[in-house]
Image (cartoon, rainbow, N blue to C red):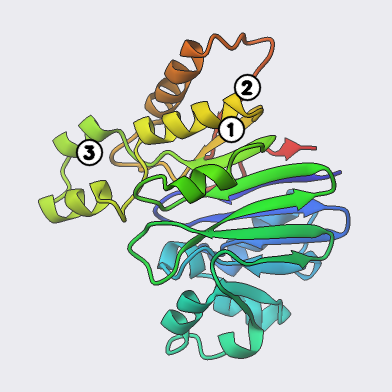
């Protein structure tokens, strides 16, 4: 059984799992190792069953559990050059643990092909991923302030897309965050709004995507209902019938999301 699903998704912590054949790739480890182990157990995966970890960037909600996970398993950790340089002072083990790559590189982990691409975020060298598992193409991208032409190109022709839908712009502007934080989130290196996510999803659906999981929703500036409404609004304009799909799901913040089986 092969599947792709989130384990946690939000400002308090992020992790996802892609399982294909004998290969289990963890994407980010922004939750405690104990919580990660408990959630993976629900999927019949143990920490020692993990093949490798891919890190999108160095922010705490994406790497919080990585040191304990490495000490317990000595698992290979893949991260971009800029991310590795950013974390080496606080996580000195990364140089012996990390498969360091340049954004844009492609490589294989077990039975899964990995393509990397840069994402515009206020981090040292953040990346997203396109995966190949047999004949299946799947994408994962969060923490991006806007969609670049490269990102759009990398995410076309997927059957499944996990994509950030971080905030509703009106809720953010009217909410309690200080102005500097609002500017950061809305900036070109901040987070993707529901509307910008919806536009990208529409392009992906035109190119065949039939499963979308909306990720990294802000608990202060968004709701699942608002995120789905924005995405479904653009999909309804494409006149895609419900019988044809696509399925639009929302990743919960603190537990396993609905798996995409393939």
Q: Position of residue 6 (x, y in %)?
A: 60, 47
Residue 159 relative to residue 79: left or right: right
- Residue 138, by quadrant, is top right
- Residue 99, by quadrant, is bottom right
Which residue occupies 51% across, 61% down? Answer: 127
Mark 2 vs mark 3, CA separation in Å:
28 Å
CB-based contact (under 8 Å), mark 2 and mark 1: yes
Label 3: how many residues lie within 10 Å, few (<14), some (14-19) or many (20+)? Answer: many
Q: Quadrant of the N terminus?
A: top right
Q: Taking the image as drawn, is residue 213 in sight? A: yes
For this orientation, the residue located farthest to the left is: 179
Which residue occupies 42% across, 53% down? Answer: 143
Q: Quadrant of the C terminus?
A: top right
Q: Secondary structure at mark 1?
A: strand
Mark 3 vs mark 1, CA separation in Å:
23 Å
Residue 149 relative to residue 95: left or right: left
Q: Which residue is mark 1?
A: 212
Nearest the eye: 154 or 134 = 154
The earlier-in-sequence mark between 2 and 1 is 1
Of circles 3 and 1, which is in front? 1
Image disc number at residue 196: none
Mark 2 vs mark 1, CA separation in Å:
7 Å
The earlier-in-sequence mark between 3 and 1 is 3
Q: Secondary structure at mark 2?
A: loop
Image disc number at residue 246: 2
Image disc number at residue 172: 3
């Amino acid at each position: 059984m092969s599947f792709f699903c989130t384990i946690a998704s939000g400002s308090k912590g992020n992790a996802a799992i892609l399982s294909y054949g004998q290969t289990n790739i963890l994407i980010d480890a922004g939750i405690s190792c104990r919580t990660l182990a408990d959630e993976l157990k629900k999927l019949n995966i143990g920490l020692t069953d993990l093949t490798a970890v891919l890190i999108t960037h160095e922010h705490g909600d994406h790497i919080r559990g990585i040191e304990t996970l490495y000490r317990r398993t000595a698992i290979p950790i893949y991260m971009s050059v800029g991310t590795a340089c950013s974390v080496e002072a606080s996580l000195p083990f990364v140089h012996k643990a990390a498969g360091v790559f340049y954004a844009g590189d492609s490589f294989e982990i077990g039975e899964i092909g990995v393509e990397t691409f840069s994402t515009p975020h206020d981090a040292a060298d953040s990346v997203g991923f396109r995966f190949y598992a047999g004949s299946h193409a799947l994408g994962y991208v969060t923490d991006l302030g806007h969609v670049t032409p490269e990102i759009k190109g990398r995410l076309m022709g997927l059957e499944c897309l996990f994509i950030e839908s971080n905030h509703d712009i009106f809720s953010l502007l009217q909410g309690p965050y200080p102005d500097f934080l609002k500017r950061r989130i809305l900036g070109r290196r901040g987070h993707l709004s529901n509307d910008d996510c919806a536009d990208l999803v529409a392009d992906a659906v035109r190119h065949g995507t039939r499963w979308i999981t909306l990720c990294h929703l802000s608990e202060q500036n968004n709701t699942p209902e608002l995120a789905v409404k924005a995405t479904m609004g653009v999909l309804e304009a494409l006149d895609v019938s419900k019988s044809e799909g696509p399925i639009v799901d929302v990743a919960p913040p603190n537990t396993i999301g609905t798996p995409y089986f393939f």
